[in-house]
Amino acid sequence: MLNLSRIYAKSRQTAENAKPNLTANESRGDRKLPLFMVNHGFTKSFGLAKLRDLAEEARVREIVLAPLTRSRSYGNVPQVHAILYYSQRTTKGGLLIAEATGVSDTAQGYPNTPGIWTKEQVEAWKPIVKAVHDKGGIFFCQISHAGRVSNYDYQPNGQAPISSTHKMIPPQKQLDDTMIEFSPPRCLTIEEIPLIINDFKLAARNAIEAGFDGVEIHGAHGYIIEQFMKDSANDRTDEYGGSLENRCRFALEIVKAVIDEIGAERVGIRLSPFADYMECWDSNPEELGLYMVQSLNKYGILYCHMIEGRMLIVDERRQIPHHLLPMRKAFNGTFIVARGFDRDEGNKAVAEGYTDLVAYGRLFLANPDLPRRFELNSPLNKYNKFTLYIADPIVGYTDYPFLED
């Protein structure tokens, strides 16, 4: 089974920078204890390094709650039922990543998704974050902008969604078999790009104000950052298009702005170089992934969360393709993988050093006590794809049973 007492991997350089005078009881083998475990009821002035002392008590898990769109934040404001949803999935020392949370009123692409650009939204997040911290969890907010993965209905004054391009996404079938349609996007001008970068910076500031321990920049799933990074979507001819360096400029400028605002130790990023979500793919995904992680090393961010490539079918069994190994080797911080992992594959990935942590989405959605089920190798609930995105505050959301039920 997964070794639930294993400590989060953290780069030596970051560890030394955060607290130079480590004592013998502050390490496990050749790995330093995590320095980024924030809050747990403490004020920000308490200091990140002080929180190191909680690591032994926390018994940090290698099982991460992946960010999952749940479409239950009416009017883009987080609701009280999210308190129960996230607290149900909190284990002491475990890392949870909140659902994609919009950085501005132009960032939305789906109904009832949360934002963090207004005071009302920040205040609504506070009791949700507190509930996670009260159970000893670590909570990061995924800050996101859908870009062209949107339509007029979700945009202020019915305007066109913004993107790196004018190219429109054709209708797409969702997991619950519904079809979604998109509107023709408007290509951002050079002068507008800094405004979007600033939206990410302010969203990061607001996330810390709401009590989150840090933020995950959403650079995956065909959203606006990928629309700049990947050559299938980016047809620009200016300094944000063409070469790999130019296409990644927008993403890295966002990273810099966010770490300048809240500190590198509070920042992660999610990337999906091998994916083709929302008509967004790259002709050389490995080169893209390597360039990004090598660039991210210069900023010293906390973690890189990557989506695995499509599953392989070998002897009628799904297998992880392990496309991410070069990125794993190149990245200096904590590495998280997601997509298609079950208990055994996750266990194997960690044991073989393919990753430090594994993020689980639908399995965690349907099994709020997933770490315990993995520990006991217990049967798992199956998720209901037809209730993933409905607006009901209970059904398909907080009504999945625990083992003792």
Image (spheres, rainbow, N blue to C red):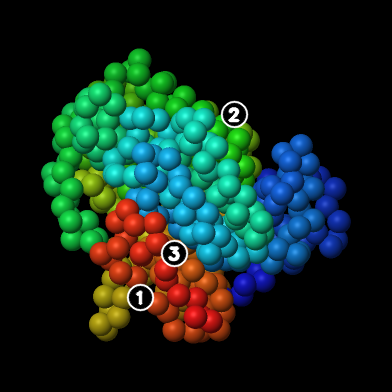
Residue 159 drawn above or below residue 211 = above
On the image, numbered disc 3 is attached to which residue?
398
User: What mark, if any, has residue 260 been given in the picture?
Assistant: 2
Circle 3: residue type: Thr
Mark 2 to mark 3 CA distance (whole Å): 37 Å
Q: Secondary structure at mark 2?
A: helix
Residue 312, given in percent of the width and then of the height, sits at 28, 71
Q: Are marks 1 and 3 in contact (CB under 8 Å)?
A: no
Kindly report the distance in space between the C-alpha atoms of the residues bearing marks 2 and 1: 42 Å
Q: Residue at x 76, y 37 (%)?
A: 45
- Label whose residue precedes the other's in the sequence (2 or 1): 2
Q: Earlier in the sequence, mark 2 or mark 3?
A: 2
Image coordinates for residue 392, horizontal then vertical, percent: 34, 57
Q: Quadrant of the N terminus?
A: bottom right
Q: Is 210 left or right of 250, judged from the image as shown?
A: right
The residue depicted at 24 percent of the width and 38 percent of the height is 150
The kind of residue tagged 2 is: Asp
Which sits earlier in the primary sequence, circle 1 or circle 3? 1
| Residue position for label 1 | 382
Per the image, label 1 sits on a secondary structure element best described as loop
Q: Position of residue 173 (x, y in %)?
A: 17, 55
Looking at the image, which residue sits at the far top?
191
